[in-house]
Structures are given as structure tokens and as C-alpha cells.
Image (spheres, rainbow, N blue to C red):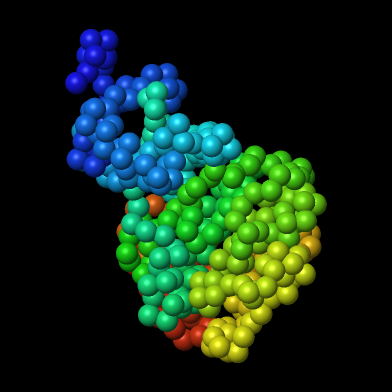
Amino acid sequence: MMTAVESHMTYSNSYTINNETVYMTQEDDWDRDLLLDPAWEKQQRKFTSGILPSQLSAGTHRKSGRLVAIKVIDKARFPTKQETQLMNEVAILQKLSHLGVVLLEGMFQTVEYVFVVMEKLHGDMLEMILSSERGRLPERNTRFLVTQILEALRYLHLKHIAHCDLKPENVLLASADPFPQVKLCDFGFARIIGEKSFRRSVVGTPAYLAPEVISSSGYNRSLDMWSVGVITYVSLSGTFPFNEDEDIRQQITNAAFMYPRQPWTSISLEAVSLINNLLQVSVRRRFSVGKALGHPWLQDFQLWCDLRAFEQTMGCRYLTHCGDEERWIRFTKERGLDFPPHLCWDPDM
């Protein structure tokens, strides 16, 4: 039941969460009010009791029928530090518009709750790795995912934004397809870092932390590249590059990484080379986004074909470049291979 004041408000959007309707009014520049059905509020109190101060719920945009993901935060149980991270995430996402970054639809709140509405995706990279037949992904699939991660990072880094918490759980997948669209999410630790500037606050998840973060010696956007190295290792092997029974932080700072015979004898040396260039303790020696994308492991004809086929289904080009066709046409001619003309941006080429 709505109050007399609430009944005179105009609702520009509404969502259904847990079979209850959530209304919000849109004010200036993301300032939104939320009205809840009392029955839903009662259910939500029970839902959050004794669990975490925030929950991720599936919701539906009432007008369009579009599915959305909604973070529901109980203010009374929300630590100040986490609240700061949430506000930082919203502030960062408001600046971003890229197919490789999760779309923020809005944030609004009541006296008791904060709601962050984002596009709903299928799953994440960790789930894909764990559910695969061997508990790890083939090189072909890993190349496809890592390229998209790097292209999203290229966009972020050009905007002087470091994600600071890259890990497979924060690499969302738009579908269950073996070659899905990738979107980065969870920007709670993200920082705006200038070209030559360094930050010193501890951020991120321990297993994916760069050594300069652990040693508090200052970090810049290259900490994301270290995380890409760990993600690539985990995707190809199904394990971390260090002994989880020992001090992870010490192994990271000492670059004491392992490549056990199984499964690494079946993984290409080019893949190992890229990982080694990303897992460099020296920030100056560590690959940038551009160098990583130019590495032979990611300059692969099958990968280019997979990316082009994906771009055609998306109806836009954002992972490959128009000049690539001539190079791969020469490549196939030199090796007596057939070039798939339907993948050309210009079909008359």
C-alpha cells in the first residue's frame, strides 16, 4: 500500500523481483527513488537475515520484460567500507560504455535498501572452467575469452581506469555458447590511475594480486595484466600457478610458479610464453594490453575466424580490425589454405 505522497509520484521504471513489483522514479542524473510493496519488504528482511548485507537477485523490467540483475543491499547491515566500494563501482560504471563491460542501468534506494540494477548475463568464466569436461578450457576457447578481456581492458586503460580485481568470477558470459560474449563486472575496487601515477591502497583478491600490490610498493594499471596472466593459467590448467598449501603472497612476490608436466606438456609453448610475459614481477617488463594482443599466441588464424564469426552475429566490429583481412588472406595463400570470404568485412575483397 502506498502513502498519499507516494501515490502522486510518477514512475518511469518498474521491476519485478521475487514476484513482487519494485517501482522507481527517475530524477536528475541517476538520482532515483524506490517504492516497494510492503509484502516484498517483509520477504526481503527474512531473505537477508543472518546472511550477507547484500544479495544479487534476478529481476524483470516490467515495461520491456527484459531480465536484469539487481544487487539488493540492506543499509543497516552494510559495512561502511563495502558501501564505499559500492558507490565507487557505480561511479566508475557510469563513465563506461563498451560491449566488454557490464551495463549499469541505475542505482536507487529507500530508507532501508540500496538497489543497483545491471544487465543480466548467463554465467561467468569460473563456472565455464569448472563445468568443462576436463576441468579446464582448450586453448582455442581460452584465446577467444582472453582476447575479449584484453579488449575491454584496452578500453578501460585508455580511460585511465584499472579494474584492480580481475578474476574468472568477474568475467561474465552472455550465453552458454562455447564462444560467448565476455563482459567485465564488479568494479568495486576499480581506480582511476593516470599514465605515470601509482596507487598504494591494497585492492583485489589475494590469488590474483600482482606482487607490487602485496608489497605495497605502489601499482598502476599493469596490475590488471598480472591478473590476466593468472586467469589464462587457470583457464588452461584448471589450477593456480602456485602451491595453495603454502604462503600464496610469498610465492607471488618471488614469482615461484609451477608448470607441472600434466597438463602443461599438452599446452603450447606460445601460451606459456604469454603467461610468463604477463606474470613478470617487474612492472616495466610486464606486457601491456597492446603487447599481449600482439603476442603470437593471440595472433592466430583460427582465433581471428572465431572472432569474426562472433562479430557477425553481434552485428558490429569491436574485436578485430579492418586491415586484418589482407594479412590473413596472404597467410592462407602461403599455406595453401582456404580463406572464408564470408568473414571479410568487405565481401567484395
List x then y, in percent, for residue 45: 33, 36
Decide if residue 340 is on the left or right side of residue 323: left
The structure residue drawn at horizontal position 23% and vertical position 10%, both measured from the top left corner, is: 4
List x then y, in percent, for residue 171: 47, 57
Quadrant of the rendered image containing residue 295: bottom right
Numbered circles on residues, count: 0
List x then y, in percent, for residue 299: 56, 71
In the foreground, 111 or 156: 111
Quadrant of the rendered image containing residue 28: top left
In the foreground, 344 or 261: 261
If the image is split into quadrants, where does the N terminus sit? top left
| As drawn, 99 above or below 181 | above
Decide if residue 205 is on the left or right side of residue 143: right
Decide if residue 58 is on the left or right side of residue 223: left
| As drawn, 317 above or below 261 | above
The structure residue drawn at horizontal position 53% and vertical position 45%, both measured from the top left corner, is: 187
* Residue 291 visible, this orientation: no
The structure residue drawn at horizontal position 56% and vertical position 66%, both measured from the top left corner, is: 231
In the foreground, 257 or 337: 257
Quadrant of the rendered image containing residue 338: bottom left
Decide if residue 43 is on the left or right side of residue 297: left
| As drawn, 158 above or below 314 | above
If the image is split into quadrants, where does the C terminus sit? bottom left
List x then y, in percent, for residue 277: 70, 69
* Residue 145 visible, this orientation: yes
The structure residue drawn at horizontal position 32% and vertical position 64%, both measured from the top left corner, is: 176
